[in-house]
Image (spheres, helix red, strand yellow):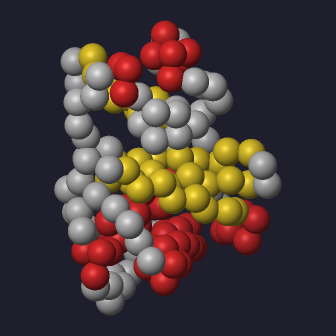
Amino acid sequence: MQLTDAEKNRLLDLAREALEEVVRFGRMSEPAEPGGALQTPCGAFVTLYKGRRLRGCIGLVEARTPIYATVRECARAAALDDPRFDPVVPAELLSLRLEISILSPLVDIAPQDVEVGRHGLLISHGAQRGLRLLWNGTGNASNFLKRPA
C-alpha cells in the first residue's frame, strides 16, 4: 500500500490520539473517518519506544478493518495489552515515540525469492501464530530462514 505523506501523517496522528485517549481516559473516541487509502483494509503493527527502548508492540497481520481503524486498535493494544510490559501510564505519554508498520497481504513465496527488508515470515502452530520480520537484525534472507522463531 502506498500512502501519501499527508496520509502517513494522518495515520500517525490517529494512532497518537488513540494512545493518549486510552491511557488518559480508558477509552477511545471515534474519529471522523478519513477517506482515500486510509479506508483500505490492511494489517499493521504499532511499536512504542521510550527513548531507544521498546515499550510495546502489537499488530494485526491480516486485513480485517480499514487501516486507520487497525492502527488505532494496535496503538491501544501496544499501550495496554503487550504482555511483556506494564500498561503505559499518563506520565510516559510525552516520552513515547510511535512507529507504524503497514503490512501487505499474505502471499506464499519461495525461499529463494525472499528479500531482506521486504518480506516477513508468518509461523503457525495450532492456534498460535507469530511473525518474524527480516529487519529485526537477521542480516540476510538465508540466515533469516535458518534461524528459529
Q: Please state the total of marks drawn on the protein image.
A: 0
Residue lying furthest right: 51
Question: Quarter of the image containing the N terminus?
Answer: bottom left
Residue lying furthest front: 112
Residue 83 image point, x, y percent: 51, 37
Side of 89 where 45 appears, left or right: left
Q: Is residue 115 above or below residue 93?
A: above
Residue lying furthest bottom: 32
Residue 98 image point, x, y percent: 61, 62
Query: Is residue 2 visible to the viewer in this orientation of the structure?
Result: yes
The quarter of the picture where residue 94 lies is bottom right
Query: Is residue 87 visible to the viewer in this orientation of the structure?
Result: no
Residue 57 image point, x, y percent: 53, 47
Residue 14 image point, x, y percent: 46, 76
Q: Nearer the viewer, residue 85 or 10?
A: 10
Q: In this view, does 88 lie above or below 33?
A: above
Task: Identify which residue is drawn at 27% across, 17% down.
Answer: 125
Q: Nearer the viewer, residue 50 or 121?
A: 121
Task: Identify which residue is drawn at 25% across, 40% down.
Answer: 106
The quarter of the picture where residue 36 lies is bottom left
Task: Identify which residue is drawn at 74% across, 45% down.
Answer: 53
Q: Which of 25 and 99 is in front in this view?
A: 99
Side of 85 where 83 appears, left or right: left
Task: Identify which residue is drawn at 24% across, 68% down.
Answer: 40
